[in-house]
Amino acid sequence: MIEVTLLGTGSPIPDPRRAGPSTLVRAGGQTFLVDCGRGVLQRAAAVGVSANNLTALLLTHLHSDHITDLGDVLITRWVGNFAPDLTPLPIIGPPGTAEVVENTLKALQFDIGYRIAHHADLTTPPPVEVEEVTEGVVWGRDGVRILVAPTDHRPVAPTIGFRVEHNGASVVLAGDTVPCPTLDELAAGAGALVHTVIRKDLIDPMPMQRIRDICDYHSSVQQAAETATRAGVGILILTHYVPALVPGQEEDWRALAATAFDRQIELGDDLHRVEVHPGVCVKPAG
């Protein structure tokens, strides 16, 4: 079984009810954080997970709302872990990730210096191990395998999606993207697809062009559902709602997805949890 928890389901617009985009995936005793939007560690703490518990950090792309709390994750894991030899945190993301991590640590160099000067057992900066990828198998430990494929969020490029597999169960995390063949292939036959969604019908009437611009590089609810149907996934999990999912409107969003996907649809507030078991997929369309 793979457990998926939507830690943050919000958007770049601050929302008192929703943290920034982030998803927790637990499989085979390993804990993966996918993206790290604002408030991620507070949400993780609510389900009993600390920065110390993270097996790896997976980044779908480098838009600010998906990496807002990168520094918090790195520093908190470092100062809150009392192991004599802290192992580096694996960080897997698209090209550019290493530069972002390096510059984040550079921005925190004063804080890091203060802590090293104050605590005798802190002698080096937060240890990290960055791997930049665009496709292929990127993880294979203790029965958990992770694959990566390109997605399409242009002009943001490159962007990637992740597929986590364990004992016959599988979950795909699309990140921000429009429909594309590489995502269809990554998600083919998966037990669940975690997909970011927007409501174009609510955004198109808005007078601000900058807000309307987001429609051309995100998937609508219906498009995410169509991707899930083509790939033959068992469960469609919606997240990163734009505009924010208002309490009482859940069934409206679900109904839109149901126009193109006739299986299990999951959506909800932060901390919504879904169990994905083996055998909950169908044959991909085509």
Image: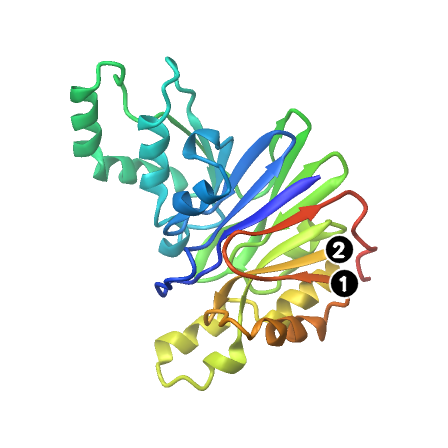
- Figure colour scheme: rainbow
Whichever of labels 1 and 2 marks the residue nearer the N terminus, that label is: 2
Q: Position of residue 115 (x, y in %)?
A: 20, 25
Residue 189 percent coordinates (x, y): 76, 51
Secondary structure found at label 1: loop
State whether residue 162 appears in this view.
no
Q: Which mark is residue 29?
A: none
* Dot 1 crowding, Cα within 10 Å, few <14, some 14–19, many 20+: some
- In the image, taking residue 182 as reference, residue 232 lies left or right, namely right
Residue at the image position 42 percent from the left and 78 percent from the top: 212
Residue at x 46% of width, y 79% of height: 203
Quadrant in the picture for the C terminus: bottom right
Circle number at residue 263: 1
Between 244 and 233, the one lying in front of the other is: 244
Are dots 1 and 2 in contact, CB under 8 Å?
Answer: yes
Instruction: Indicate the amino acid at tag 1.
Output: Arg
User: In the picture provided, is 109 more to the left or to the right than 88?
Assistant: left
Task: Out of 224 and 42, give the one closest to the viewer.
Answer: 42
